Amino acid sequence: MANSNTQTIKATDLFVKALVAEGVEQIFAVPGEENLDLVESLRTSSIKLILTRHEQGAAFMAATYGRLTGKPGVCMATLGPGATNFATPAAYAHLGGFPLIMITGQKPIKKSKQGQFQIIDVVGLFDPICKMSKQIVHGNTIPSLVREAFRVAGEERPGAVLLELPEDIAEEQCDAAVITPHKRYYAVAD
């Protein structure tokens, strides 16, 4: 609950601020209904949205960015079949040791008017081929989950990480602060 001294911010705006704090300069994506709030928040940010024709292409581009720079590449897709198209590039990043952050949308989790339409357990699907796979269940957890995702994707043997952002969580008002990573997380091995 926000106190009188705390300003609230939309969850997707908080998500974008957390990505900017991590040094993200571009996201490779196929936008869809379930991630439109995030796309709108990206529109007014410094992050460049690079549209691709297919989710698999977006994730391969992000994984290759991670392979070449040593910094996690970021990609975004919607739910269901859009999210499952990240499976092959996730395995590529996992097996190759390339840091990759995959962001997927999801139907509302608190209550859904459409029932189970296109609902797939994306988090469970990606568990075996990712270093971390989590659904965001409250907007105020976004800064810590984004920080953890980038840390996990880049540490030890780098690999793929998945964050799922449901529509209703994306719309929440939040009062959490962005976590600025320590400068050592920006160091890239030569």
Image: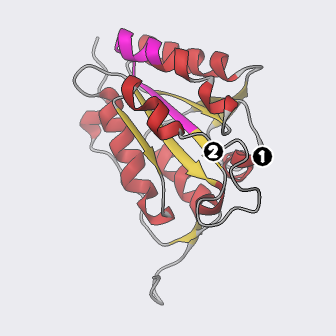
Is there any visible trace of residue 69 in the rendered image? no
Q: What kind of element bears circle 1?
A: helix
Q: In this view, does 35 lie above or below 65?
A: below
> Residue under circle 1?
33
Question: In the rendered structure, which amino acid carries the disc numbered 1?
Answer: Glu
Residue 70 pos. (x, y %): 37, 19
Is there any visible trace of residue 80 in the rendered image? yes
User: Is residue 102 in the magenta section?
Assistant: yes
Of residue 106 and residue 16, the one placed in the foreground of this image is 106
Picture quadrant of residue 71: top left
Residue 155 pos. (x, y %): 26, 28
Residue 27 pos. (x, y %): 61, 31
- Bin the neighbour count of mark 2 within 10 Å (Cα to Cα): few under 14, some 14-19, many 20 and up: many
Q: For the N terminus, which image quadrant? A: bottom left
Residue 167 pos. (x, y %): 66, 56
Q: Is residue 181 above or below residue 115?
A: above
> Residue under circle 2?
105
The boundaries of the magenta stretch are 91-103
Work out how far the residue at label 1 is from the one at label 2, CA to CA, in angstroms.
8 Å
* Outermost residue to the bottom: 4
Give me the residue at 38% from left, 40% from top: 149
Give me the residue at 43% from left, 16% from top: 93
* Outermost residue to the front: 116
Is 50 situated left or right of 76 in this image? Answer: right
- 1 or 2: tag closer to the N-terminus: 1
Question: In the rendered structure, which amino acid carries the disc numbered 2?
Answer: Gly
In contact (CB < 8 Å): disc 1 and disc 2: yes
Give me the residue at 53% from left, 45% from top: 164
User: Is residue 183 in the magenta section?
Assistant: no
